[in-house]
Image: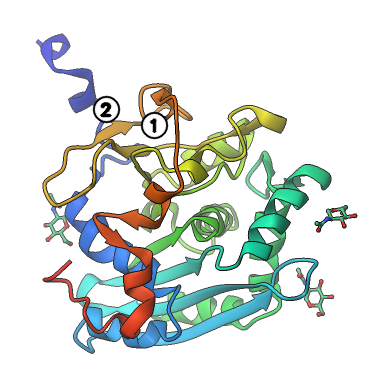
Amino acid sequence: MFLLLPLSLLAVASATGINYNDTLARTRFWPLAGAAFGENPAQCVNSLYNMDAEFIGQYNVVCDETNVDTCSAYLAILPTERAILLAFRGTNTHGELTQEVNVTFYQPARPFVGGGLVNPFFFDAHLALVQNTSLGADFQRVTSENQGFALWVTGHSLGAALASVAAGTIAAERLYPSNAILLVAFGQPRTGNQAYADAIDRLVPNTWRVVHRGDLVTQLPPKGFKGYWHHGTEVWYNNDMSEGSPYKVCPKDDSNDCSDSLLWYNAEDHGTYFDVSLQSFSQNGCSQVTTNQV
Ligand SMILES: *[C@@H]1O[C@H](CO)[C@@H](O)[C@H](O)[C@H]1NC(C)=O
Ligand SMILES: *[C@@H]1O[C@H](CO)[C@@H](O)[C@H](O)[C@H]1NC(C)=O
Ligand SMILES: *[C@@H]1O[C@H](CO)[C@@H](O)[C@H](O)[C@H]1NC(C)=O
């Protein structure tokens, strides 16, 4: 009987049995990840939740050798979702991207606390955010005051890689219960090696790595180059991601059945997810975004 079910249906649930939720990713995680790119993420989160959110703080650090580029994260409490939100901002300058590529080539990967190796740029940027801002202390306070809440971790591009390292570290160091963490990453570059992918699969079983069609950044660094390998679980939209669009779920690490199956990739698909561009979040303090509209 079971063998008659299409494989894609059998494979949709994550290790803890949670299914990918298109609505949740589309109307909550994507705007929340986008808010990290704005001048004023607090305003964005407040308009998204009609003021029913508690913005804890935004954390910025210099995150590379140029001493110019900053990496950023913000922390908020979303009572209506019974969730704590930790969102990371991705690459916002050309210089940062150059540095990412350079560091990836020239510096050794760093050992990850949960096992495996992580790209040095992502690892150091995450460490700088945790060590050189009040993020660590605020996180500890907020999580101890809101036990029982889910922990939502998200980001786009470099922010997605940082979200992956952060969620994995939080689980590995037992700073929050593994099964309460929900990681939704958009346009994530390959962040570590196969052992890192295994570690994330084990430590953060509720992980959805959303890929828009031929998003070029999700193919960087190239598969297997210096051992780089994607963790699960990929959710691939081979379309414009407008409402109601189909998607394919590939739990296997760096599966050839999802976006790896394409022959060409492009930068345009990276900047727009769910038919809403990143830029639209960073302009106007997200005043146009509500959970009903997106
Ligand atoms: C998906 O998420 C939306 C938004 O949070 C929620 O209203 C809906 O109940 C969820 N669907 C399922 C099947 O859990
Ligand atoms: C790239 O990294 C190498 C070694 O760390 C450094 O010598 C070089 O200046 C860097 N190049 C750029 C363009 O940042
Ligand atoms: C934290 O800041 C200090 C002083 O600027 C710097 O030397 C150090 O490298 C930073 N730590 C990380 C992990 O970036």
Q: Nearer the viewer, residue 150 or 240?
A: 240
Residue at 14% x, 14% y: name it: 2
Nearer the observer: mark 2 or 1; the answer is 1
Q: Nearer the viewer, residue 269 or 156?
A: 269
Counting from the top left corner in percent of width and height, residue 239 is at 24, 39
Q: Label 1 is placed on what type of residue?
A: Ser
Q: Is residue 245 visible?
A: yes
Give the total of numbered labels: 2
Q: Label 2 is placed on what type of residue?
A: Ala
Residue located beneath label 2 in the image: 11
169 relative position to 257: left or right:
right
Quarter of the image that includes the N terminus: top left
Counting from the top left corner in percent of width and height, residue 26 is at 23, 58
Residue located beneath label 1 in the image: 259
Counting from the top left corner in percent of width and height, residue 116 is at 67, 38
Provide the secondary structure element on which disc 2 rests: loop
Mark 2 vs mark 1, CA separation in Å: 16 Å
Provide the secondary structure element on which disc 1 rests: helix
